Amino acid sequence: MTDPTNFTPKNQNASDDGWAREALLRIVEENLKEWRRSRRWRFAFKALSYSFVALMLVMTAFSGWQTFKAQHSPHAAVIKIMGEISAESGANADRIIQGIRRAFSNESAKAVILEINSPGGSPVQAGMVYDEIKALKAKYSGKTVIAVIDDMGASAAYYIAAAADQIYASRASVVGSIGVRMDSFGFTGLMEKLGIERRLYTAGKFKGIMDMFTEPEPEALAQIRATLATIHQQFIGVVKEGRGERLTEDPNLFTGMFWSGEESRTLGLIDGFGDVRHVAETVLSLDASLDYTPREDLLTNLGKLHAAVSSLLRGVIGLISLAEGPRLL
């Protein structure tokens, strides 16, 4: 006999099975739609990525072709000399000379433009660049060199500019400062007031000549002034050789004074007014200008940062330290 408590109508079982089947089909259908949508998005993303890469390759190839084409067409080669001129800065002799040599060796570079924006710096670095330009001008006799001063072309920067056939600047540029300087400090008076005694031990009478905590002897001061005067005369000789009869007889010309571009033209320190574009197009009659300034790589920049931080730490330690051992400098 059948238990009435376990009785289930046939239509109810069929209804439950149909609902489950329908629900499962809906789930599968929705998953299939989602998969198709995600697949379309993945395809679209890949297509976009490949298109971007292809576009970059095309642009790179086009840019490379344009650069190659420009390098083999008549143009002006521009070498930038920016910031302080020193062995540790971006405007060091090795880097500048590398760009200048590339410019002179390319037959399509009909002229070299030195774009200068610098307050000066090392006379040694400037002298190396000056000598290299003179040697290259003698080797490549048909190549014109023009210096273009932006905001400032003073001291060692003007030393380099003097090697050019012509010098241009803005009317408001700062030009000149044909002189030599050596900086130091003196704390002897303050040390006496504070009761501090400086103890410096050297081997050699004038080994501590630049020590800021001791009073320099007259003989040492005379030697410093003589050395500076010698370098100054070298600077004057370079400017006179480069500018020749264009210089006026102004008594302040070699005193270390600087002038505006407008005043500099009157003094014969520059030949005219204009920027790089004006000089290339108007003076040199060249439609194209290419930058030949060597790029600094990442390792070089990291090395400079490390050197700067190390120098700063050494300076702090030196100020904190009250006594120093013997040093061989």
Image (cartoon, rainbow, N blue to C red):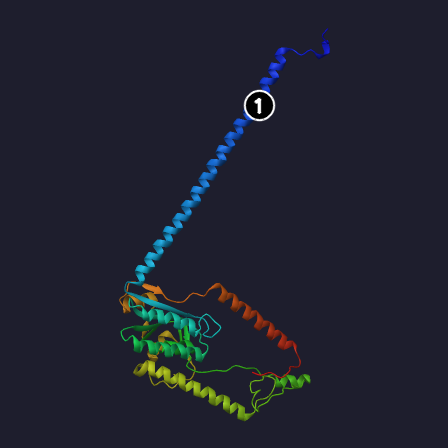
Q: Residue at x 44, y 80 (%)?
A: 124
Depth check: 202 or 76 in front?
A: 202
Residue at the front extreme? 1
Which quadrant holds the N terminus? Answer: top right
Against 246, residue 66 (above or below) is above
Q: Look at the image and tell me in which quarter the C terminus lies.
A: bottom right
Vertical position of residue 295 compared to residue 46: above or below: below
Please count the marks in the image.
Answer: 1
- Residue 225 visible in rendering: yes
State the residue lying farthest toward the top.
1
Q: Secondary structure at mark 1?
A: helix
Q: Nearer the viewer, residue 59 or 157?
A: 59
The residue furthest bottom is 219
Q: Position of residue 63 (x, y in %)?
A: 35, 56
| Image location of residue 219, percent across then percent down | 53, 93
Whether residue 308 is situated above or below residue 248 in the rendered picture:
above
Residue 158's x, y, as percent? 39, 77
Q: Residue at x 50, y 88 (%)?
A: 224
Amino acid found under the numbered disc labelled 1: Ala
According to the picture, the residue beneath numbered tag 1 turns out to be 23
Label 1 crowd (10 A; few <14 / some 14-19 / many >=20) = few
Residue at (47, 38) in percent of width and height: 41
| Quadrant housing residue 67 | bottom left
Across and down, in percent, residue 49 comes to 44, 45
Q: Is residue 16 left or right of residue 268?
A: right
For the question of whether residue 263 can be seen, the reply is no
Quadrant position of residue 264: bottom left
Q: Is residue 329 left or right of residue 134?
A: right
The image quadrant that residue 175 belongs to is bottom left
